[in-house]
Image (tube, rainbow, N blue to C red):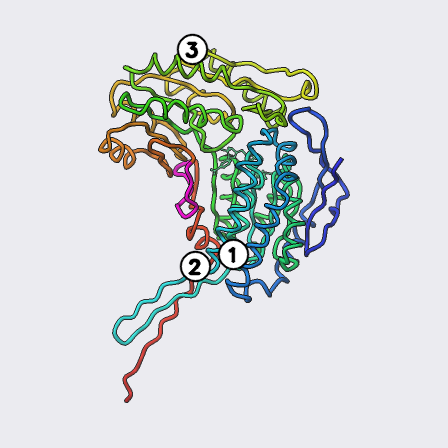
Amino acid sequence: MQRYRNYIGGEFRESESGGRIPVIEPATGQEFSTIPDSTPEDVASAVSAASEQKEWSSIGGEARSRVLNRIAEGIEARLEELALLESCDNGKPVHVARSVDIPRSARNFRFFASAAVQFGSDAYANGDTVNYSINHPLGVVGCISPWNLPLYLFTWKIAPALAAGNSVVAKPSEITPATASVLAEICSEAGLPAGCLNIVHGYGHTVGDAITGHPDVKAISFTGSTATGRLIAAKAAAAFKKVSLEMGGKNPVLIFDDCDFDRMIETTIRSSFSNQGEICLCGSRIYIQRPIYEKFKTEFVKRTRRLTVGDPRDDTSDLGAIVSADHLDKVQRYVELAKTEGGAVLTGGSRILPEGRCSGGWFFGPTIIEGLPNDCRTNQEEIFGPVVTIAPFDTESEALAMANESAYGLASVIWTNDVSRAHRLASRINSGIVWINCWMVRDLRTPFGGVRESGLGREGGYHAMRFFTEPKNVCLKIYDDE
Ligand code: NAD
């Protein structure tokens, strides 16, 4: 059994409280590790260690870039170990962690290693004046991340924060803390100076809240639920802190009858059920133009029934376990709710009980529901599991209205070969990200984030570098004294 510790000031430390939080492997229901039940005092120690770190902000982008590249190499060197740990914590198939989560975590560090040397600032020459800006790091920043893509999202925040010259106090989800702990070892071995990265384990209402409320933490980068984002926004507003909030979603998929059916159906299976549907970008409301509705429904149900749900260590498992007993319960409750709202379950809809090693695990069959009104709770609230709804539409404007009838606005997917329609819809749909004839294709330079209750601010590329810096404008007047 692993016993993880906090990482503060370059040292692995127990919490001041001495308390421990058990971490359960979703695939077995068994305790797998423990983490410190840290307190606001631990957060204060981490902020103090981060504040004392002065070297990192002054060594320059090239030196920071070298360290960040070494961290990327360290992640790659421990690929197998990290992939297994990610799966033990989260329940996702090991092959998914090996091919998606862990490589992307290394890529986050490599990408921002490059940004550290590329990120520049503005200068404006205007007659006898020159204005230029200096991008100062903020100082100590807080990074708080969720359980669904643990190392992937943790590093997506930490890498730009470090690249920009800040010191970080970070909190991984208490449900999936393992890979963050290994990252601390990797950073230490890569030569990241003590105090640059501090990791405090524990619950959100204690550790997360203390990071948000600490007066020396200048900005909070958060990914998680809208409910938590709202709490963080309120607390940070009182202290005028910068916040970047990546929150929930209920993403629409619009499928027109002129689309490339084969590409669409293959991708829609992935956009519905990858990572057990536990990706904020998964499409959960699928709208299909009526002429191909029956064909889509038949093929989609057939392919979904072919998906294998089982032991995450088995390479043939398409879906692993749901992250926690509470979350499984939530998913089940939504399926029951859908039935009371008039929905028909076409496939899935119930728990799966494997035999052997995973007999105590939390597995749920990929589920398709039809026949629901667009404004019902099942279609309006985030389920964040392997559950999608399907509904027909007739016209483009009807599809757009259904897609936009949502409090959320993270991502949307449009399938059509009509290029005018694709652009028209892309400009009218209410989401921060629009994929046309694809899904989850990521260029790390692009602005990443949502609108409405899905997000505030943007991550990615220079958007993240700007978030983690404060520009200071310097105006110089040139006198013609010759
Ligand atoms: P969550 O909000 O419960 O927890 C996220 C993190 O916040 C955890 O580390 C948690 O401990 C911490 N936290 C909880 N309460 C806190 C508080 N009061 N103050 C500070 N921190 C606190 O979310 P979750 O259940 O871990 O993750 C699932 C959610 O994340 C879903 O809603 C999903 O859509 C969202 N998500 C969004 C994105 C995106 O990019 N928009 C990406 C992944 C996940």
Question: Where is residue 153 drawn, in percent x and y?
Answer: 53, 41
Q: Residues within 10 Å of mark 2 (few under 14, many from 20)?
A: some
Task: Tell which of 309 and 127 is nearer to you.
Answer: 309
Residue in view at x 31 percent, y 79 percent: 478
> Would you identify the image quadrant in which residue 372 lies?
top left
Residue at which label 1 appears: 163
What's the distance in space between the residues labelled 1 and 3, CA to CA?
Answer: 51 Å
Q: Which residue range is magenta in the image?
A: 441-453
Residue drawn where x is 42% and y is 22% of the image: 379
Quadrant for ligand 1 reads: top right
SS for dot 3: loop
| Image-quadrant location for residue 68 | bottom right
Q: CA distance from mark 3 to mark 2?
A: 53 Å
The vertical placement of 159 against 56, above or below, is above
Q: Position of residue 413 (x, y in %)?
A: 36, 30
What kind of element bears circle 1? helix
Query: Per the image, is 313 magenta?
Result: no
Q: Which residue is mark 2?
A: 119
